[in-house]
Amino acid sequence: MRVPLSWLRDYVDFDMAPEALAERLTMLGMEVQSIDRVGADWRSVVVGELLEVGPHPRADRLSLTSVRVGQDGEPLSIVCGATNIHVGQRVPVALPGAILPGGREIGVTSIQGQQSHGMLCSGDELRLTDDADGILILDDDAPVGVPLEQLIGDVVLDVDVKPNRGDALSLIGLAREVAAITDGRVRWPEVRVPETGDATADHVRVTVESRDLCTRFVARYVDQLRVGNSPLRVQLRLAAAGMRPVSNVVDASNYVMIEMGKPIHAFDAATVGEGHIVVRRAHPGERMETLDHIDRQLTSDTLLIADGQRPLGIAGVMGGADSEVGPGTTAVIIESAVFDPVSIRRTAQRHGLRSEASLRFEKGQEPRLARLGADRVAQLIAEWAGGRPAVGAVDTNPAPDEPRRVAFRPARISRLLGAKIDGSQMSETLARAEIAVEPAPAGPGDGAETLVAIVPPHRRDMAIEADVAEEVIRLRGYESLPPRLPDQEMPHYRPDPYRFVNDVRDLLSGRGLSEIVTNGLISSAEHLRLGYAADDPSTIRVANPVAADHSELRRSLLPGLVRVLGTNERQRREDVAIFEVGASHAFIDGDPRQTEQLAILLHGHSAPPSWVEQSRAAGVEDVKGVVAWLVERLSRRELRYRPVDAAGLVEHPGRIAAAIVAGADEPTVVGRVGELDPRYLAASGVRAERVAFAVLDMAQLTGLRPTEVLVPDLPRLPAAERDLAVIVPRGVTHAQVAEVISQTAGPLLVGVSLFDRYQGPPLAADEVSHAYRLRFQPTDQPLGEGELDEAVRRVARSLEEQLGLRVRGLDTAGGA
């Protein structure tokens, strides 16, 4: 909101520099965004008096004038092309050497053979008004020779009024803020309507059909007026405040809107059928042309001001072109109402008509301003346009406004603000904002002092105790609060719920895998390739999908990983090592469930080839190693694998295993690892045939993480190792062999590793030789050779008895 300080001084006294006032208003929450000085860019522009106005001897459209610009000195001869000048007028004169806005320099020039010593200025050339055709005519009592800046110059503050302070969107509202700063008093304009003749009710009837959207409607009638220009002082004030002067009648309503914050509209009384004003919702299919000359389609949600036959204006937003006040208007009906803020905002947005009036209606209106604003406009029209206001007004709800009462506890407000302020100090502070305070009625409570703030109707932003606290410190000054550190106990440590997931991401990224994020919505075709029927009731489908490719919530992360693999193939990047942590979704027992998963996919070289050694293709063993390493880092537990049947056409038969972690009660299956079926890859548009993958359950992994990690003592004795070669027939897995060794080698066994595998002569075609290295770690005394040999023989006997294996090069009966 633009605030001319000369206009603001009509309502409150203050003796502060504009910069100091701007700083104080900003500290009050009324941020001043800029300070503009009207007239600061005028140089050598003074008030002159026209002594002579005659025709130019050589130009029909020019006048030759004689202008007095001071008490002493000769009059200046100036050539002028305007037609609105005559002898005796006071006008702005740019003297030779003057500089006008925009850097325009004025000198002595010759126009059609006549010397022109300066220039008579229009309002547009001084950037005061939009009138560029005529000279700016000053008041008759303007002192000759006085610099124009001194006479009509001004300082304008651009104030950013916050949405909850609609009462401050007026000069009187900001005068209240200045009075709170200076401990001054606000002066309201003296409203006296010169009523004569018959009553307003003889000319105007008002029917409010939509009382929920219009709580009060006040109408006044003024006739015998003459539409013309407003006084220059009014035009300059409106222009400085950002409003374009139109005419004395329209300017009167705009003047009151800036002054009091009350939007008011004047209708040409001759266009209102039978003087009957109807406030109603628009009828279906109804149309009207607004003041901007746009024909608008109305809806039933639009509140209208109408007569008995047609709309006259959109309530609170803009009037209609048919009822506009024009040069021929001789009588007007003044409308001053209170409308529902939500309805006005929605209407303005629907029609793209955000106006100064709708801006104020949207923030709520003080009901008493309806009558006061109508009277003030009638008074100004009578003063500026010579109108005759009829006696009284038509008022649909003249009941007085009741102030809001808000209870507050000074002790509680002191705690909120962090400063000790007693109740009497708060009462004195609130009084500066016209808020009275009284003791609360006696009643049950905690015994603390309770007061009641009597909030005037214009302060719609104060409703609860916290609002009172904000108002107290706003008026006292936020800078008055003593700086201190918080003295309350800090909250207890709360573990990060995403810590485990972030650890998984960090570990896999450090291992060389790239994290991807794919869309949680996939197509039904991708679910079909996973083996889910098109009408599977467990699949969660989108009611209105944006695209067919994003119509169902994914039940597995694999389609996204395979899609990324295909993208890399098309861009000739064959080496892919990626992972994703995400959610899968399905209906379980009729309820939607979300499962967090970790999916890994490897394809291409296991490591980049180099001159030292050749690389090999990544396979199941690589993804098994990544998963086993990850589980060991996260849970300090050993991971084992068990062959399982392939699921549908997604997993490769014979190359799929369950990942199992041994627990205290029973083993925990954390996921599956293996290769993808080449048929599934081909159906997904991928050329690769061998792709290793793993899908793990994040909930199971999280449950494995220990609450505390015990670090064992470093061994004081050296470890001992023994190698064992076993002939393994087809059908016996490494996991079975390792489990038997772990169970029978004794408590000193700390590690079993498969370090060699041989298949060929002299072994049978269905036999494989596995070489295992057993690592024993003594605790209190070194291990003897006999103890080690006995442990190895015990393992060998168990392998023969439980799995039917043959141990190479070892006498299980007692010697090697």
Image (tube, rainbow, N blue to C red):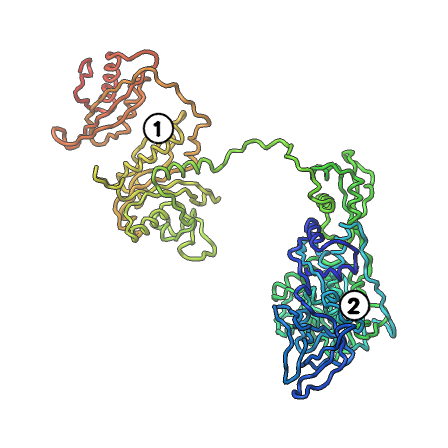
Is residue 104 rendered to the left or right of residue 753?
right
Q: Residue at x 69, y 78 (%)?
A: 134
Q: Secondary structure at mark 2?
A: helix
Quadrant of image for the C terminus = top left
When asked about the image quadrant of residue 652, the answer is: top left
Is residue 438 rendered to the left or right of residue 22?
right
Number of residues whose C-alpha sits closer than 10 Å to that of mark 1, classed few (under 14), some (14–19) or many (20 or more): some
Circle nearer the N terminus (2, 1): 2
The reply to whether residue 221 is in sight is: no
Quadrant of image for the N terminus = bottom right
Q: Nearer the viewer, residue 526 or 702?
A: 702
- Label 2 is placed on what type of residue? Val
Q: Nearer the viewer, residue 655 or 42?
A: 42
User: What number is the disc on residue 361?
Assistant: none
- The answer for how far apart the CA atoms under marks 2 and 1 are is 88 Å
- Label 1 is placed on what type of residue? Glu
Where does the image place residue 340, in percent across and percent down from the top left?
70, 60
Where does the image place residue 195, in percent across and percent down from the top left?
86, 71
Mark 2 highlights which residue? Answer: 377
The reply to whether residue 135 is in sight is: yes
Mark 1 highlights which residue? Answer: 638
Q: Nearer the viewer, mark 2 or mark 1?
A: 2
Q: Is residue 315 above or below residue 495?
A: below
